[in-house]
Amino acid sequence: RKREKRVPVSASAEFPIYRGLEIRLLTVEVKDLTVGGADVVVKAALGNLNGFPFTLEHLTYKLDLVGKTVASGTVGRGVRVESHGETVFAFPVLLDFFEVGREVYDGLTQPPAAARIEATAEFTTPWGILNFPVAKSDKIPVR
């Protein structure tokens, strides 16, 4: 009665401690700029804060410059991002200032330019396919 028997039990398992992703806006490179339009490349880096690598299925993004949406789409199919590493993506954009407005022209000619990127990363890990939304707003240099 009031006696207990204890049996030691040990278990081990492998599971991820998920720390998330981060995205950073790097630069806007202006290749050609006229009063009517511009040919620009916006660069952003997707960083892996986790202790495990992953393979990107795709990165669906929406890119805003000076408060106007200038591009959206999907990039990065099959890109591998190492643990605690990052991958730089380039988003080429052809701008027509008659459509997006003079504010974007003014933002590109008077750096730094206000930019925002919203993205959803779908990636494959040893534990399955995960989706993770990321967003970043920043003032970035114009080259």
Image: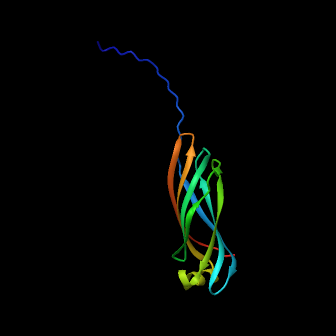
Q: Which residue appears farthest toward the top when viewing the image? A: 1
Q: Which residue appears farthest toward the left when viewing the image? A: 1
Task: Examine the image and state in which quarter residue 117 appears.
Answer: bottom right
For the C terminus, which image quadrant?
bottom right
Q: Please give the name of the residue rendered at 56% of the width and 49% of the height, measured from the top-left corner.
A: 123
Q: How many marks?
A: 0
Residue 54 image offset from top left, x and y in percent: 60, 47
Question: In front: 39, or 65?
Answer: 39
Asked whether residue 17 appears in the rendered view, the answer is no
Q: Please give the name of the residue rendered at 30% of the width and 15% of the height, measured from the top-left corner.
A: 2
For the N terminus, which image quadrant?
top left
Residue 134 image offset from top left, x and y in percent: 52, 59
Q: Please give the name of the residue rendered at 52% of the width and 31% of the height, measured from the top-left corner.
A: 13
Task: Examine the image and state in which quarter residue 92 appears.
Answer: bottom right
Q: Which residue appears farthest toward the bottom when viewing the image? A: 35
Residue 35 image offset from top left, x and y in percent: 63, 87
Question: In front: 83, or 9?
Answer: 83
Q: Please give the name of the residue rendered at 62% of the width and 45% of the height, measured from the top-left corner.
A: 53
Q: From what the image shows, is residue 13 above or below residue 78?
A: above
Residue 55 image offset from top left, x and y in percent: 61, 48
